Image: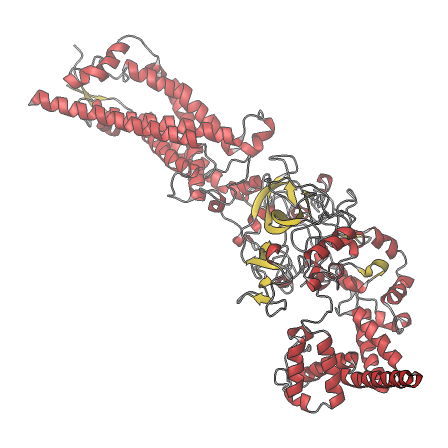
């Protein structure tokens, strides 16, 4: 017996075991010395709600207009006007590029253009009482009882003028309802923000796929942050607001600049717009996952699908708009979907999808945006907007996006996309006359229309960041690490299991097969020859 | 000749005045109608007869012709509280009809982005 | 005939542990590459990494053993009878010729084996281990790596070497059958003992 070799073998085995154990235990390496979340801070809205606005005499007036009402607010909230007029909620214009913005030349592939305030339906979402004319409507974001304030003020005033007993009685009721709404105010809640942001693109869940009314009282399974059973956040919890300037993506500006990419652990005054603000850059217990987070945005794995509750619009064909039934416009709703039409005379044909798998692209927080004056090139794809990023660039990560395709009108002579006027009595939705709609729409944004138009397909992408699911619903390895996995179309990244070099793999497999064949032949020859020798 | 012109113009004046008075009586006050209509829904909700404070039908749920037919037949079974409708007087009905007609699906009121 | 302890217990342990590791690494490695699904991607990665690290530990011990026992001298290449050995496998083996070289406790490897194993130890194992470590700790090492050495380049090279290992493995397994009888060599590697002809 070789005693020495036994000893060596035992030592070797035990060392291998040590290696295996140390590899396996690597997983809880940093949880011990780094907090996983930044500590929670107190909720803002409860502090503000202590002021009882119903005590204020100035709010008990019989307001004859929205402007009058706002002036009453401004008697106490004195500096708000200046802040508000600087904010994008008022300007509808990019600070860095004046051509960009809903009130500028920006177009999308939903309702296309807001027509610089001419398209009244789009301007419903502007925070002014009458677009940018006159005062801001404070109630839109701050009243905790949503109602149609403009209608209430107009009707009450009209009925008071009529003066008969019944009218006065009704007017008093309307005034009471209005007053209740005016004094029940606080920091914006999800319904204030959602009133516009959940209805982008013309209806609930239409535009974003990660923003819709399902977020109100959402289950934890759909959104861990917003759910009352989860973190019960308000929107401002992440969209940090200072002097009415709200953090978030603004056209081609990143949601936050790289210098802001810090966690609350480093700086408790940091903007909370990024995941890392609260979760830090190493949020996982497993090093491999933290490594992934250097290339892949958190959203990619933690928002596995878009539109989990209500279907979102994925395709829109304006070219079929204008069909009539018995000479009248009509709508065809799709059964089983939450109030979604497959066809509307005023808008054309729609495709809606639930549980949409996003598109994945390199993204550094910026977008390229097309405007109504940009030329289109025949035969080339038209990207209304597109995420920007450099593969493995310092601030770039692979992130998920909602893709939307639309067949929309363009000027065949000027080769620009067209901005039709849709609402208002002269718009397409009333007159069903494209020529008129283009003439008026293009005029409203100060651009020419040649008189000749056709339809062309365009693409747009919207960032995905809301509806973060519980950790156990995140993507698993094989969602990407498999042939034609989720990231198969992402360029300049190696995905083991999907992106192997095809030629190398074929060469290697052939090499091994040839070797097997070679030794088999050699063996066969030996067998035959030995048989011969014996025989 | 002069006489004929005077009589004719007088006749035109009388007819048009009568017509406008007649028309006004038929139109009703849409604003009163709106709040009466909404008030009925609220009352039904308070009495526990319906699940929503809001009316179950919008003006844009029907076309003008459909509203006209409904009010001609006085068939209110589609509303959440039909028995309350029977108690309404002609004036209230006319006001409500004026409201629904004004904002019906095929009315010229500008369509919203919905 | 004489019964000789050809392979010590450590050598046998080393050989079979390494054989097991290489086969496991090959299977899990090709699963990670996306050729087939057996353990599942995440398990395949885990097994591959643990086996890889374990094998490095084993190799460190084997190197130590080779130097302390002087067994490394077995791998010093020689051109003596090298051609004869090659010709034997190409022609002689079919005619039932005797092995051109003699095997004993101090000359376990024939000239061709010496050359192949030395090449294996110098040009196949070290780069494959380095590539594996680069792959594994890529995100920690990236700031220090030259720009051309992307994860894709590392992964593809690692796979290229893996194919060469697989190629070797096939030949190696086949060559075990070329002993006195088909199973002589395998038996020797299991029991450690081999019956050798008296040296004349």
User: Looking at this view, is A330 or B14 the one in front?
Assistant: B14
Residue farthest toward the front in the current orientation of the protein: B1
Give the image location of residue C45, x and y in percent. Answer: 45, 39
Going 80% across and 69% down the picture, which residue do you hit?
A: A150
User: Looking at this view, is A272 or B12 the one in front?
Assistant: B12
Q: Quadrant of the C terminus of chain A?
A: top left
In the image, residue A249 sits, relative to residue A390, either above or below, namely below
Residue farthest toward the left in the current orientation of the protein: A535
Residue farthest toward the top in the current orientation of the protein: C80
Q: Quadrant of the N terminus of chain A?
A: top left
Q: Is residue C26 left or right of residue A270?
A: left
Q: How many marks?
A: 0
User: Looking at this view, is A158 or C62 the one in front?
Assistant: A158
User: Looking at this view, is A247 or B27 the one in front?
Assistant: B27
- The picture quadrant where one finds residue C93 is top left
In the image, residue A471 sits, relative to residue A530, either above or below, namely below
Answer yes or no: is residue A314 visible: yes
- The picture quadrant where one finds residue A48 is bottom right
Going 51% across and 35% down the picture, which residue do you hit?
A: A494
Give the image location of residue A114, x and y in percent. Answer: 74, 55
Give the image location of residue A79, x and y in percent. Answer: 89, 56
Give the image location of residue C87, x and y in percent. Answer: 23, 13
């Amino acid at each position: 017996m070789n005693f020495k070799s036994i000893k060596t073998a035992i030592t070797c085995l035990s060392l291998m075991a040590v290696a295996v154990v140390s590899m396996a235990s690597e997983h809880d390496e940093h949880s011990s010395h780094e907090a996983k979340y930044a500590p929670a801070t107190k909720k803002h809205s409860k502090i503000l709600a202590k002021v009882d606005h119903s005590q204020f005499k100035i709010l008990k007036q019989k307001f004859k207009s929205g402007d009058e009402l706002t002036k009453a607010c401004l008697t106490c909230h004195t500096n708000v006007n200046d802040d508000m007029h600087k904010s994008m909620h008022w300007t509808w214009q990019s600070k860095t590029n004046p051509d960009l913005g809903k009130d500028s030349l920006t177009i999308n592939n939903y309702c296309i253009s807001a027509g610089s305030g001419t398209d009244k339906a789009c301007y419903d979402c502007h925070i002014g009482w009458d677009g940018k004319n006159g005062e801001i409507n404070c109630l839109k974001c701050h009243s905790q009882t949503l109602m149609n304030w403009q209608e209430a003020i107009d009707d009450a005033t009209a009925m008071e003028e009529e003066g008969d007993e019944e009218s006065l009685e009704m007017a008093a009721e309307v005034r009471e309802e209005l007053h209740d709404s005016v004094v029940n105010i606080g920091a914006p809640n999800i319904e204030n923000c959602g009133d516009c942001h959940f209805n982008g693109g013309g209806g609930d869940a239409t535009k974003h796929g990660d923003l819709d009314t399902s977020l109100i009282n959402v289950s934890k399974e759909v959104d861990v942050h917003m759910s009352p059973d989860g973190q019960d956040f308000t929107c401002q919890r992440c969209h940090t607001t200072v002097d009415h300037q709200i953090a978030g993506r603004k056209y081609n500006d990143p949601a936050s600049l790289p210098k802001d990419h810090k966690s609350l652990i480093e700086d408790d005054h940091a903007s909370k717009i990024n995941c890392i603000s609260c979760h830090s850059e190493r949020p996982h217990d497993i090093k491999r996952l933290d490594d992934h987070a250097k290339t892949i945005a958190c959203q990619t794995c933690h928002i596995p699908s878009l539109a989990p509750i209500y279907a979102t619009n994925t395709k829109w064909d304006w070219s079929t708009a204008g069909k009539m039934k018995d000479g009248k416009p009509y709508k065809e709703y799709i059964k089983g979907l939450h109030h979604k039409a497959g066809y509307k005379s005023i808008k054309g044909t729609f495709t809606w999808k639930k549980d949409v798998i996003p598109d994945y692209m390199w993204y550094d927080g910026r977008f390229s945006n097309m405007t109504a004056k940009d030329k289109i090139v025949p035969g080339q794809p038209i990207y209304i907007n597109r995420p920007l990023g450099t593969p493995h660039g310092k601030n770039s990560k692979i992130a998920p996006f909602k893709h939307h395709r639309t067949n929309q009108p363009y000027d065949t002579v000027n080769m620009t996309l067209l901005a039709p006027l849709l609402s208002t009595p002269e718009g397409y939705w009333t007159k069903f006359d494209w020529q008129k709609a283009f003439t008026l729409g293009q005029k409203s944004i100060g651009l020419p229309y040649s008189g000749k138009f056709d339809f062309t397909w365009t693409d747009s992408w919207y960032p995905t960041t809301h509806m973060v699911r519980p950790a156990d619903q995140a993507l698993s390895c094989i969602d990407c690490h498999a042939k034609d996995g989720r990231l198969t179309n992402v360029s300049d990244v190696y995905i083991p299991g999907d992106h192997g070099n095809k030629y190398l793999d074929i060469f290697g497999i052939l090499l091994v097969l040839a070797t097997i064949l070679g030794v088999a032949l050699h063996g066969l020859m030996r067998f035959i020859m030995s048989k011969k020798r014996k025989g | 000749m002069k006489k004929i012109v005077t009589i004719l113009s007088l006749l035109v004046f009388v007819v048009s005045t009568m017509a406008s008075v007649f028309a006004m009586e038929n139109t009703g006050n849409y604003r009163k109608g709106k709040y009466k209509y909404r008030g009925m829904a609220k009352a039904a909700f308070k009495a526990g007869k319906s699940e929503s404070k809001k009316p179950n039908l919008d003006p844009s749920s029907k076309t003008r012709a459909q509203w006209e037919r409904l009010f001609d037949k006085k068939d209110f079974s589609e509303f959440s509280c039909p028995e309350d409708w029977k108690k309404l007087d002609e004036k209230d009905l006319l006001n409500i009809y004026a409201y629904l007609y004004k904002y019906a699906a095929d009315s010229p009121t500008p369509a919203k982005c919905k | 005939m004489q019964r000789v302890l050809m392979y010590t217990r450590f050598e046998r342990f080393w050989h079979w542990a390494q054989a097991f590791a290489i086969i496991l690494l090959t299977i899990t490695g090709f699963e990670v590459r996306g050729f087939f699904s057996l353990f599942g991607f995440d398990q395949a990665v885990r097994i591959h990494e643990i086996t890889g690290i374990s094998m490095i530990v084993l190799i460190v011990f084997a190197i130590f053993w080779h130097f302390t026992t002087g067994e490394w001298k077995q791998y010093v290449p020689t051109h003596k009878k090298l051609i004869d050995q090659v010709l034997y496998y190409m022609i002689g083996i079919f005619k039932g010729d005797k092995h051109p070289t003699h095997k004993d406790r101090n000359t376990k490897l024939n000239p061709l084996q010496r050359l192949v194993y030395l090449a294996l130890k110098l040009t196949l194992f070290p780069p494959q281990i380095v590539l594996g470590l680069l792959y594994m700790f890529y995100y920690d090492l990236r700031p220090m790596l030259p720009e051309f050495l992307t994860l894709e380049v590392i992964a593809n090279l690692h796979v290229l070497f893996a194919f060469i290992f697989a190629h070797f493995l096939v030949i190696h397994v086949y060559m075990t059958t070329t002993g006195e009888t088909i199973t002589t060599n395998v038996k020797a590697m299991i029991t450690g003992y081999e019956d050798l002809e008296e040296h004349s």
